[in-house]
Image (tube, coloured by chain):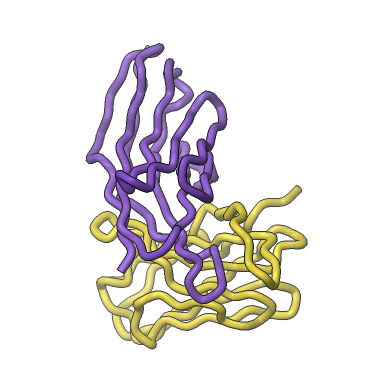
Amino acid sequence: GDSVTQMEGPVTLSEEAFLTINCTYTATGYPSLFWYVQYPGEGLQLLLKATKADDKGSNKGFEATYRKETTSFHLEKGSVQVSDSAVYFCALSDGSGGSNYKLTFGKGTLLTVNP
Amino acid sequence: KAGVTQTPRYLIKTRGQQVTLSCSPISGHRSVSWYQQTPGQGLQFLFEYFSETQRNKGNFPGRFSGRQFSNSRSEMNVSTLELGDSALYLCASSRATLAGDVGELFFGEGSRLTVL
């Protein structure tokens, strides 16, 4: 079955540091890939997505590129802020059952950014 | 625009009881999905409903069931509760289409169930 593996946390960085959170996946076919973020006290929200190989998703300074050859979708940001402190989830959808809303999630990575 | 609303937010039950959780999606959203979140297993897909029909189902026992009403509101039910059912149950809605698209899921804040 499908699976998503993302780097274990927690990750602690200083403000303005470079962020990488690794994510690799196993899936049949050509899944769509997502990063969701959960800020303290809030529900999950979509950060960015990519639907085909070599697509780059970007939002709020975060980027991730869909790499089919390495089955990866690593999240990066050049300069993190304290407000980026949250739990980040990598996820995929393989479109099974005619729906793209059955997501397989990674375990989540807690990011803490210190001033 | 109101977000996804889940009720109740917190509840405590004992083993063997049953529980019903409710989800009101964002107005205009036709797809509702349910996920279970636990520290050990993370986020796991339960089921998805679209236009009152279950479109997808995860690998959970038959004790877990759900339904969707004509106004897109959804409920999930867990019967004969076990200690391992203690979790945060998340509902998510999306605009969706009949043909299926890669859209955004909008999550509620969840219903936290504790089974004693």
Q: Nearer the viewer, residue A78 or A11?
A: A78
Residue B83, percent from left and from top: 25, 73
* Chain in yellow (letter): B
Query: Who's the residue at 45% across and 58% down the image?
Result: A31
In the displayed structure, does residue A58 sit left or right of residue A110? right
Residue A36, percent from left and from top: 47, 44
Q: Nearer the viewer, residue B14 or B97?
A: B97
- How many numbered marks, from 0 up? 0
Where, by quadrant of the figure, is residue A112 drawn? top left
Q: Nearer the viewer, residue A91 or A107?
A: A91
Where, by quadrant of the figure, is residue B19 drawn? bottom left
Q: Quadrant of the C terminus of chain A?
A: top left
Query: Who's the residue at 54% across and 32% down the image?
Result: A58
Q: Is residue A21 above or below residue B6?
A: above
Q: Quadrant of the N terminus of chain A?
A: bottom left
In the displayed structure, does residue A51 sit left or right of residue A69? right
Query: Who's the residue at 52% across and 80% down the image?
Result: B66
| Hue used for the chain lettered A | purple
Residue A88, percent from left and from top: 40, 40
Q: Is residue A51 above or below residue B100?
A: above
Query: Who's the residue at 34% across and 86% down the image?
Result: B80
Where, by quadrant of the figure, is residue B48 drawn? bottom right
In the displayed structure, does residue A33 sit left or right of residue B51? left
